[in-house]
Amino acid sequence: MNNNLRYALAAARLTTTDVAAALAVDPKTVSRWLNGRTPYPRHRWAIADLLNIDEADLWPEASAPRCQPLANGIHAIYPHRWAIPQTVWRTHFNSAVNEIDILAYSALFLAEDPAIHRILTQKAKAGVQVRLLLGDPEGPEVAARGEDEGIGAEVMAARVRNTLALCRPLLAVPGVELRLHRTVLYNSLYRADIQFLINTHAYGTPAAIAPVLHLSHGKEQGPASTYHTSFNRIWTETQPYKQ
């Protein structure tokens, strides 16, 4: 019996049918979860997002970090970007006090999350500098990345344009600046102050499948410092995006 899940559903006034509809599963499956069966990770993360609570509060035994603890500014390695719960991304950006940096070709998975938009908006209004660097959809680098991932140049360019469209309300917030780059990226970068999530790129592999490094930027010149320098160089070589 999973009493944590049972109590959380009761507090949210959700029934097994509500959860089943939200996750596109059979209500009997939800009943089995209530009776103690542990859901697959993707279902655990979806339920945690639905209830707006941490996965560990519902399944503490199953939600141990899916990464390897390391040292020297390297805190974790996630095997795939999709393996990172959405709550981790939200907590990451919500921890920022001074600066948030995002460097990617499209970062569409973040642009499609309303919670991320709320966090970035709130942070910018609180004085946090938010800098967004996305690939120029008209540039050859975006086209090449689309071919590298196997989705095609037009699809990759469309992903960037979708992100730009979704970010329009965000760009109206003082403190948020977006620029387009024409740079060959070997990784995507997601920074919140001294914490970095680095999504590596691999030829023939979508970014969602590639590993993600969790780094921190300390006083010593560790690996995070290298990525920070790379971001700043690209930023200084680009111009503000004009809608």
Image: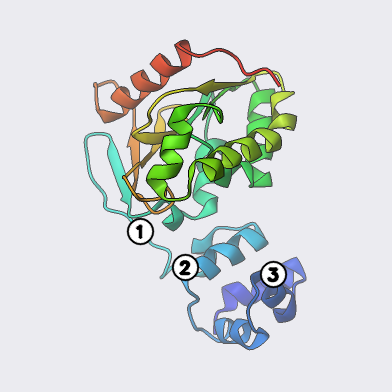
Answer with left or right where residue 225 lies relative to residue 132. left
Q: Which mark is residue 41?
A: 2
Q: Quadrant of residue 70?
A: top left
* Cα–Cα gap, marks 1 and 2: 10 Å
Question: What residue sits right under mark 1 in the picture?
Answer: 66
Q: Nearer the viewer, residue 7 or 145?
A: 145
Please provide percent x and percent y for residue 4.
58, 73
Question: What residue sits right under mark 3 in the picture?
Answer: 22
The structure residue drawn at horizontal position 60% and vertical position 73%, both measured from the top left corner, is: 5
- Residue 90 visible in rendering: no
Please provide percent x and percent y for residue 12.
74, 66
- Residue 172 visible in rendering: yes
* Cα–Cα gap, marks 3 and 1: 25 Å
Q: Are marks 1 and 2 in contact (CB under 8 Å)?
A: yes
Please provide percent x and percent y for residue 155.
55, 45
Name which of mark 2 and mark 3 comes first in the sequence: 3
Q: Secondary structure at mark 1?
A: loop
